[in-house]
Amino acid sequence: MTTATATTPATTDERTLAELQRDHGPALLSFLLGLTYGDQQRAEDLLQETLVRAWQHPEAFRAPYESMRPWLFTVGRRLAIDARRSRMARPTEIGDGALATTPDPADATESAMAALDVRAAVRELSPEHRAVLVRIYFDGLTVNEAAADLGIPAGTVKSRSHYALRALGRCLPGYPVRH
């Protein structure tokens, strides 16, 4: 960090900064909107931070640029990259609404209701389909083990498992029907 001397001011003067914002602010905001995928609030925050950097670095105005725009766009782009990396490094924040609709893990009511729904749906399957699902999902057998246990080819086990799961998807509440 440099210290201010008689020839080097510590910060950019307000008039120069106001001109910079007037001349380059709209173009920089448009550029930052593209980098933030249209997020107006993030783009405005990045624009403000870019202008703060211009205010903190008056030496950039003495650079051999015809315009400050390349410097501003470079600073803005780097700030956008840093902000994205920072967001990616922490878990996604969720609002209170999501927590209000999430079942309490200590409450066994939801899982008991789901288990009853699954049992009722499995009872509705044909005996052949039910036997395959019981062997694979409840007994934990592989396709080949279930095939040997049931005395049918492995391909038939796969086919019955596929169609049984589709049937369960149609009759279980809250599950989308897959075609």
Image: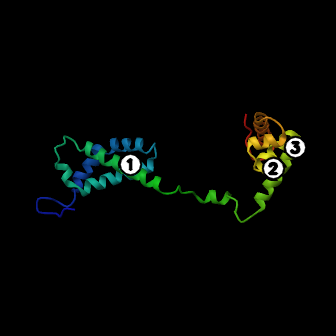
Q: Position of residue 138 (x, y in %)?
A: 79, 51
Relative to 52, is 74 above or below? above
Element type at mark 3: loop
Q: Nearer the viewer, residue 73 or 114?
A: 114
Query: Looking at the rendering, which quadrant does residue 131 occupy?
Result: top right
Residue designated by label 1: 81
90 or 24: nearer the viewer? 90
Q: Of tags 1 and 2, which is closer to the observer?
A: 2
- Which secondary structure lies at badge 1? helix
Name the residue type under label 3.
Glu
Q: Are marks 1 and 2 in contact (CB under 8 Å)?
A: no
Q: Which residue is mark 3?
A: 124
Q: Which residue is mark 2?
A: 118
Question: Label 1 amino acid?
Answer: Ile
Q: Quadrant of residue 152?
A: top right
Mark 3 against mark 1, which lies toward the viewer? 3
